[in-house]
Amino acid sequence: MRLLNTQTLQLEYFATEHKPEYAILSHTWGSEEVLFEDARNGKGSLHECKKSGLEKVLKSAEVAAQNGYQYIWIDTCCIDKSSSAELSEAINSMFAWYQLSAVCYAFLSDYKACDGKLSESRWFTRGWTLQELIAPSEVHFYDLGWTRFGDRRSFSSQIAVITGIDEVLLRRKSSCSFHQVVSGGSKRGCKNCSHEAMALTRRSLNTCSISTRMSWAAHRETARVEDIAYCLLGLFDVAMPLLYGEGLEAFRRLQEEIVRHSNDQTFLAWQHRKREGSRKDAIFAAHPACFSDGQRFRAVPSLLSEFTTTVQNGGVELEIYLAPCTVKPLFGDCQYVWLAVLNCSEVEDDFCCVSILLEETNAAPRSAAPRSFRRLGSAGDHCFPPILVSPSVGVYTTVLKDISAPFQIESELSEMVRSRILLHETKDGWSTSGPIDRRVCFTFPGGLMPGYYVRRQVPDPIAPTWENTGLPRPYPISGRTTPSGGGKGPPPYVYGAAGISDGKCEFSVIWGTFRGTRRKSDWPALNIADDENEAPFCKVCQNLDGMAQEADGLDTTDWLVRVLEMVRLQDERNASPAMVDFQPLGGFSSLTWITDSGSSVWIEAAIKVNEFLGRKRFDIEVTMKEVGFDHKMS
């Protein structure tokens, strides 16, 4: 650490931990700052410097000398920025250097005491000045004429309004036990008082949640994009290498490093903002501005040691409470997702829990791995903010902060379970290289009956990837469905269909999965484990006369929609009015129909999942046989 001697204006280097008592300067950078190269040769080279920032260096050194300090640290000239190693060490150590200082002089170059408005000073908008306000035990404010007009404690109420920082943190004062008894406060030069002040600062910061500390930087700016992350290292007591040129990736790395050292889940309590590099479904926020409301949330202390969080290459693995949830937009289909209740609450209401929406994916490599999810960031053009879940007269309701959003959220908290999940990010749309291959493989163990052939199959079974099949994503079935074995079912998604015909009669086999399995007891016939991501189903139906021919000229998606219309019409014809959409769905389906010749043809389809080297594939076996003249269609 280099310090500027206030008497000789010579830079002196101290390599050991035992440094002399020193003052420190906090300021905003201008266009002509005095750098290390200008000050390295002492007073002579400084006075030869004609930069406008020279006056700031000389006046701060003068004030420090008047207050009895032989040394002062100034970031512009005490760091050799031509050395990347020295710059990295300085930035990672800067919070501690401000903590160890005897006093910090905050120079507000655009503020005139008694004539100006403190909140309009540029000093309160810069990223680096945040830690310079919090870290020191003493902060003295000076205006543009170098007149001292107050300190952090005397202005704590006003600063708390400007910055959002808790006034208790701004007013803190500590001393060692000896001087607390003898003089009722700290003594200048006492190492024990200094160490106690540092410990109190860290304890005070640790009582503030991750989202709260991020909110303090939400409206601050830095000259370089990466510095919005680097200026927060000390606030979270983490260190990481500096990589100028990485852009907003620096802020992501900062959050990953924070999560590695904390089980506080308020790092997820952020809201999407329209900024460069920002994604609605990302795990981590793109900028502190996404935490502008973060001061509302706090971690629940009793759950911090109970919940564990791990950062890995594939995302973040964490323990969380999950409840089935339905998002109902004013227009379009409902989304069946999951409400993830975090281990945090509103600051003013411990019973008001913070939650986010998750969509289950198929990215877990094995069924034994944690269930895999990605964040559901939006519905149409409207983004989901963190959702507050609170008990009201014994009934749980979800309350959206943005009450004008054109959607409703209904959750079933009675079915909430604690789960360990993998939260990851995906590209837009459905994964094309995930572990489940949705291009189903058809087999006919006994062969097709004479005269029958596969008239059409979507998606194309020989397409190299899902994107090449003509279907942009699995097709959701709207309305109510009933899985085999009864119970309340999750939403089924159709992956494809095949039409099999003899030129006169035609039947279709459709297949897909129930996404978001809730409980094994809901689908006893499927025998799907609780941690499976998706439960497959298939259904055989007879195509209504004329509809298959009408659909021949349609594209892939429209043809599939037409087949689904056939299924609905058939079910409405065979079922009571109370049964809407599909009849019970499961991994097995059969159908018998009477041909034009009067004989009965029996078709059976069974779907199963085959796994090889961590990848899953759907296989459907179709069996056909003639069963005589006495069977009725079933």
Image (cartoon, rainbow, N blue to C red):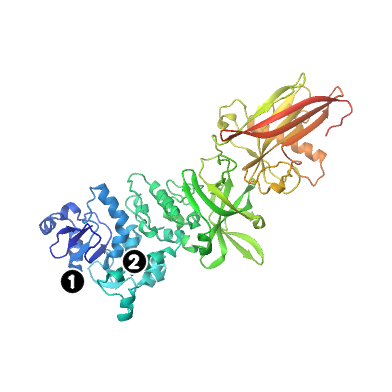
Answer with the quarter of the image where residue 541 lies: top right
The residues tagged by marks 1 and 2 sit, at their Cα atoms, a distance apart of: 26 Å
Which residue in the rendered view is the most extreme toward the top? 450
Nearest the camera: 166 or 94? 94
What secondary structure is marked by label 1?
Answer: helix
Q: Residues within 10 Å of mark 1 (few under 14, many from 20)?
A: few
Residue 198 marker: 2
Answer with the quarter of the image where residue 125 lies: bottom left
Nearest the camera: 367 or 273? 367
**Which residue matches tag 1?**
66
Residue 125 marker: none
Q: Amino acid at mark 2?
A: Met
What secondary structure is marked by label 2?
Answer: helix
Q: Is residue 75 left or right of residue 618?
A: left
Quarter containing the C terminus: top right
Q: Amino acid at mark 1?
A: Gln
Number of dots carrying numbers: 2
**Precedes in sequence: disc 1 or disc 2:** 1
* Image location of residue 205, percent across then percent down: 40, 64
* Image location of residue 49, percent across then percent down: 14, 55
Whether residue 307 appears in this view of the structure is: yes
Q: Is residue 535 above or below residue 275?
A: above
Q: Judge depth for marks 1 and 2 and give the one in front.
A: 2
Q: Is residue 587 left or right of residue 577?
A: left
Nearest the camera: 182 or 373? 182
Q: Residue at x 37, y 72 (%)?
A: 171
Q: Is residue 74 above or below residue 366?
A: below
Whether residue 117 appears in this view of the structure is: no
Q: Is residue 425 left or right of residue 111?
A: right
Q: Is residue 552 above or below residue 160?
A: above
* Image location of residue 226, percent across then percent down: 35, 49
